[in-house]
Image: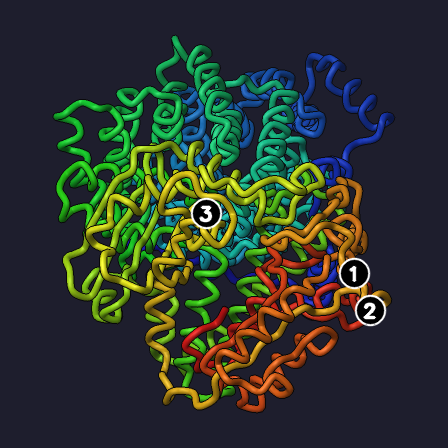
Amino acid sequence: MPHRPLALTAHAPGRRLVRLCLLALLSAVLGLAQAQSDEIEGEFKRPDAAETLRLQKLLDQPVAPGLSMASLDQIYWDKELASRILGDNQRREEVLRAAVAAVGSAPFKRNLGQLLLTKGQFDEGNALMRQAIAEGLSIESAFAASTMVCDLYRQNRDAEARTMAQEAATKISQVRRVRDMEKQVKLWRAAARRETCLSLLEDRIGHSQQAAEFARSSEEYARMALRQIASVSNEASRSGVLIDVAGALARKLEVHLYADRLFEAERVLGEYLRFSREYQLPPSKLAELYELAARLRFAQREFVPSERFARKADATLAATGLGPLSPGRVLDARDTVQALIGQHQWARALAELERLDRLAADDPAARSRLHMAQARGMVYLENGRPQDAIRALEAALAAAQAQYGPTHFHTAQASGLLGAALWRSGAEAQQARAFPLLKTAVRDFMAPVNADFLESTGIRKEVREIIFGAYLEAASGSSVQEAIDAMGPADWARGGVVKDALNDAAVRSSAATPALADVVRREQDAKNEIAGLRRFLSGELGAVDTALPMVAAQMRERIAVLEAERLKLQSEVKAKFPNYDRLVHPQAPRAQEIQKQLAPDQALVLVLPSRGAVYVWALTSDQPTAFMRADTTPERVAQLVARLRRQLDFGTEADAGTQFDGAAAYALYDQLLAPLQAQLAGKTALVVAAGGPLSQIPFGLLHTAPGGGFDAQAPWLIRKMSVSQVPSLSSWLAIKALARSKPASQPFAGWADPVFDLQAAAASSNLPTQATRHVLLTRAAAASATADLDALAAAAPSGLKYARIPSLPDTREELQSIAATLQADPAQDLLLGARATRDSVLKASASGSLLNKRVLAFATHGLMAGDLPKLTQPALALAATGREDAEPLSALLTLEDVLTLKLNADWVV
């Protein structure tokens, strides 16, 4: 029977005052910055030394004999509250057991039952809870029943939990209207707890909308109780009201977290922290704050802070007397393992699991709580224990199928991981099982219905890499056709800034009007800025391990603003742009689609490094697709790329003057392209889509024969065929799909030898001229952990100073020679020195001049993300503007700029 949020009426005055108080609370929360664990601990309100001493004395004071039942009841409530505030669960259990023996009332049985369930003593705890429901008066019975819904949920007894929720609703409705405000508060608390528990139950079966509705209802009831807390005479009951509000906030945060609304989750975490500062909560709620922070940082891919928060939560619960196998601490251990997986700390994750397994060796109930099937499977797999991984992942897949159905994203993850474990086992029978599982997982990953799960939150990226790596291995070992069919999914699975930017450009070009294209751009800009901030906070951009709390807080506040803006823009775009979702989530490219777009003289190769091999596909318009697996390790490929890049990259003084590594240039060609010469024969143009470290080298510089140097006689690949590189097959197809104009009428435009130092415009680098235009760079120290946002924006911490980029005087002659060959007008078509500016490029585009040029050339330095302060994308260094100190990016033609240019060129060099 479906559950609906309860509707309770009460004679509660002061609605206008309530709204004002709530608005004041929320407005204060909006500006709250979230940072590190010391902030949470520092903000959490605790009893001072005098209060702590008073509470300890109260606990130690013996109960006098011969007291009335009413006096005993009050004494034990005072002692129970003291033990709760102090976080001493051992003393609290002693107090509650004595209270049950001496007073025997339903509320004491309920609280004792709750405590025992928290410790994992389920039989006795459940029995006491049911006694409290049966023996309590109407409101107390409703309250106990509502509380037990969550208890049953945490024991994975969902059917019983839903039955208990219905029983609680009946009991609540039977009370009807209550004139006594203290009883009304208890009734609101019962409703709040029931709604919280139903929200959990709905989340478990994937009903996120219903879960959100119950969470909102829970908070409404809890805050109704809070507004009338002054009318509650019992101090323990007042503490319970605060606990219920905190619980409702925690549930609201979790709803946002599970729906990937991370910016909303961040705001609620701030709201919870604010609440914990204003009201005194028990230490268990401090642990809950740490747990929520750990899960939020995990979702944000900030795995180091996530681990720290999880360990803080565990230590806080341990200090209250809970054992390492109590349900709450087991959840903290799970969060720790997940954070270690995110850090690729596989050995440490295994050690953590083995520690827990030793503790639970003689405790079957605890072992069931430590199942963590999918996490275990990943950890075993990456520690070389495929058989253990298979057993764990079979359980994970069965659970996912039962909970989510056969094609859900989570089922696809479990199916793919099981397939990866079976494949890596090396056993023929198990590998036969593996490939169908992997194919199913890949198919379901790419299904439009699962598009919303493709954001790289948590460890989804790591899971995807394991699955698609195993899929490529299995496909290449099955048949040539299976390997060819794997090309599109393999290209689809890998992301990248440039690939995403080109896909974004295709989406914008499909917008019906300039105004709509502008809205699409703003939405994409917000998305890209969010991704950049997330990568910084996660350490993926090479940032310090832990950003200064103020820096991290400001970045997260910026993310929250951007996420809210993006939601509004998405709604506007979807209303006006029916094909938006299809374009934003393109399907995996097929070989036939690519072949139709290739010219007769063109060949396209996709080169993807993976675990233990590099996979290469070659396509032409007139031959079947060819496939080849190069058996080499990722480490070997990375080493060859690094050797080749030493003369191509911004380097250090140690690299200056080093010779071009012809051996590395030939080794890469020999391993990756030479085996496909039959496919490439007769083609004069090569399109390369390379992944991993191979995307960092220009394939035209590969040598087609051994022994070559760095001169005109070297066997460059580009001497045999023109070479162009694209981020991915899907982005290449996206650009191909853009509208084509008639051929350009004018031959050439070029930009060369830009002036980087306006104060020494005529000076060139003191370094010897090198044919590779190698830039000598002494990089400044990386930003320290104590830097703030202003310091990060300064030139010194982030990279090179613009005026120190060496000039390129030889490029003038190069472009003048090209202009003469193409019969261009040097006075009109060449922009050299101080004229070679970003503004000149943008103006040429805006005026339509670029549309008329068949060949465009930019003879300057290329920059990578991080080479200049705030530079988060590839860029070309053009002539300085004089504003570089205040606006470090003002002289750069960035990737974003390039995507706005109106081009019709056959060649861009």
Disc 1, SS = helix
Q: In this view of the protein, can residue 169 be seen by the observer?
A: no
Q: CA distance from mark 2 to mark 3?
A: 70 Å
Of badges 1 and 3, nearer the viewer stands 1
Q: Nearer the viewer, residue 402 or 631?
A: 631
- Residue type marked 1: Ala
Q: Is residue 453 left or right of residue 178?
A: left
> Is disc 3 surrounded by few (<14), some (14 to 19) or many (20+) residues within 10 Å?
many
Residue 238 image position (x, y, % from top left): 68, 42
Q: Residue at x 26, y 48 (%)?
A: 442
Residue 611 image position (x, y, % from top left): 35, 35
Which of the colour schemes (rainbow, by chain, secondary structure, one colour) is used? rainbow
Q: Is residue 763 left or right of residue 392?
A: right
Asked if the residue under mark 1 is in contact with the one under mark 2, i.e. CB atoms within 8 Å, the reply is yes
Q: CA distance from mark 1 to mark 3?
A: 65 Å
Can you identify the residue that label 1 sits on?
803
Q: Residue at x 62, y 70 (%)?
A: 813
Q: In this view of the protein, can residue 55 be seen by the observer?
A: yes
**Snapshot quadrant of residue 739:** bottom left
> Is disc 1 surrounded by few (<14), some (14 to 19) or many (20+) residues within 10 Å?
some
Disc 3, SS = helix
Q: Nearer the viewer, residue 531 or 752?
A: 752
**Snapshot quadrant of residue 309:** top right
Q: Which mark is residue 758?
A: 2
Q: Nearer the viewer, residue 498 or 20?
A: 498
Q: Which mark is residue 194?
A: 3
Reply above or below: 29 against 694.
Answer: below
- Residue type marked 3: Arg
Of badges 2 and 3, nearer the viewer stands 2
